[in-house]
Image: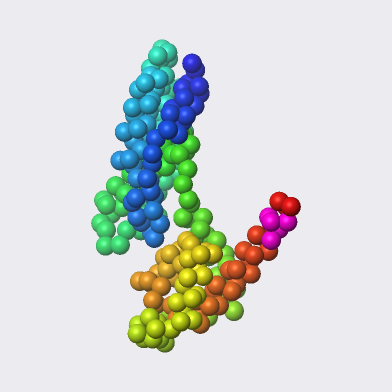
Amino acid sequence: MNVFEKINAVRMAILNETLTKDKKAFNYNYIDLPQIEPIITKECNSVRLLTLVDFPQGVATMRIFDMEKPKEDGSPDLIVTAPCDYTLVEIKGSQPIQKVGGMLTYMRRYLYMQVFAISEHDAVEGIGNLSQETANNKSETPKAEKKTESKTEQETDPKRKKLLEDFEKNLPDYLSQLVAYRKVNSVDDFDTDYLEGVYKKKMATVKPAQEKTDADNL
């Protein structure tokens, strides 16, 4: 097998593994590096592949070597890169060295997932969609930070309870993304009127797409 066939063989082997999104950050679950790296290392070894990750000049770089047919000059058979900058990492209360460590871990994980086709929900994309929606509807969106209801009022409000149930049923990931984007502690920091406005606007964009899909299936 050549190096591409071997990479594909590793990808196929990973499909048989159970990967659990049991780590939480930024209000979404994800597959962490300690879970995927041992699996990839084991499967790569079985087909005689070696992966090395380093960060020359601010670029995350994975070099892949075919140990069965090594090149005479010791160069890799394949190189995969991605830009990285630890100054973009935001970890509350962290020191600069912790930001560097967090970036290195994330970029190693990112390269592994790209090369070996491990997919998961993209939370950054979800937040990006929220940002765009907020920009498009800025003049119409109520202030999220204005909280006028007490906790007791929220808990006993049947309208609010039904609204949260509707979010969970029709937009299951949206509230957690909204909490992260607005930088509040929890959904309790949003009053009912604000949540109702957000729900109506979001569903107005979701329903036409769903109706179109249903029509296409007829």
Is residue 90 at all visible to an observer of this figure?
yes
Q: Position of residue 214 (x, y in %)?
A: 69, 56
* Majority secondary structure in the magenta region: helix
The colour mode here is rainbow
Q: Please report the bounds of the magenta region as a residue range.
A: 211-215
Q: Nearer the viewer, residue 26 or 149?
A: 149
Q: Position of residue 142 (x, y in %)?
A: 53, 80
Q: Nearer the viewer, residue 115 or 79?
A: 115
Residue at image location 39% in from the left, 86% down from the top: 153
Residue at image location 54% in from the left, 74% down from the top: 198
Q: Position of residue 11 (x, y in %)?
A: 46, 30
Q: Nearer the viewer, residue 140 or 191?
A: 191
Query: Which image quadrant for residue 135?
Result: bottom right
On screen, 52 above or below 132? above
Total labels: the figure holds: 0
Is residue 58 at all visible to an observer of this figure?
no
Taking the magenta stretch, the answer to whether it contains residue 89 is no
Q: Position of residue 141 (x, y in %)?
A: 55, 77
On screen, 195 above or below 178? below
Residue at image location 48% in from the left, 62% down from the top: 172
On screen, 126 above or below 137? above
Residue at image location 48% in from the left, 66% down from the top: 168
Query: Which image quadrant for residue 134?
Result: bottom right
On screen, 45 above or below 68? below
